[in-house]
Image (tube, rainbow, N blue to C red):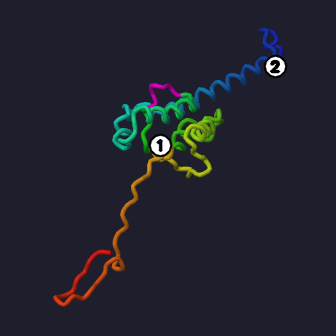
Amino acid sequence: AAFALGFIGIKAKSLVIMLIASLGLLMALSMALIRSKLMQKYWSRKCTGPEWARRYPQCSKDQIRGFLDVLIDSFGYKTKDRLKFNPQDGIMEIYDAEYPGGSPDAYELEEFFDTLDKKYGIDPRTLQKEVTLGELFEKAMKIEKPRPKPEKTKDDYVITHVDSGLSVRGG
């Protein structure tokens, strides 16, 4: 076999290098195909701007776009795709779609959180793993979530006896 390879002018070492390079290219292409399929969830969406505006009517379009630009810039996505992400999208869901199966990354997630910290003062160490873009946006814009009113219990009512009968009023 070595004679045959030498005869056609290919050295065994060169053949091994070409084979390894071909396998690497094949693996890269297959990962790109998987990534493309997983990211299709986002890329196939229509503009989510109205969803952001409904959820955060107190915020301007520029504030929403500016926040989403941190994601776009960190992950290297196109600016035209920033409104493909909605407030319910988890940052780790996006990351896992971009890097399926723990494939090597280019530190996009670290850059994203570093920029959030510098631009908005969001300390990534205080976040839960399942944090959504909406939750991050609320922290960035310092939006207070309305607290639900607690349900009244029997201890919240004052019962008094009045000559005309029993009176109950809320506490």
Q: Position of residue 131 (x, y in %)?
A: 51, 48
Residue interval drawn in magenta: 77-82
- Pick the front one: 167 or 130: 167
Q: Earlier in the sequence, mark 1 or mark 2?
A: 2
Label 1, on which residue?
A: 141
Q: Is residue 124 above or below residue 67?
A: below
Image point (27%, 86%), residue name: 160
Secondary structure under tag 1 reads helix
Q: Residues within 10 Å of mark 2 (few under 14, many from 20)?
A: few
Label 2, on which residue?
A: 13
Image point (54%, 44%), residue name: 92
- Pick the front one: 108 or 120: 120
Q: Residues within 10 Å of mark 1 (few under 14, many from 20)?
A: some
Residue 106 seen in the current view: yes
Q: Nearer the viewer, mark 1 or mark 2?
A: 1
The residues tagged by marks 1 and 2 sit, at their Cα atoms, a distance apart of 59 Å
27 with respect to 130 (left or right): right
Image point (31%, 81%), residue name: 158
Q: Amino acid at mark 2?
A: Lys
Which quarter shows the C terminus?
bottom left
- Are the residues flagged by discs 1 and 2 in contact, CB closer than 8 Å? no
- Pick the front one: 40 or 79: 79
25 with respect to 134 (left or right): right
Q: Is residue 165 above or below residue 110?
A: below
In magenta stretch: residue 126: no
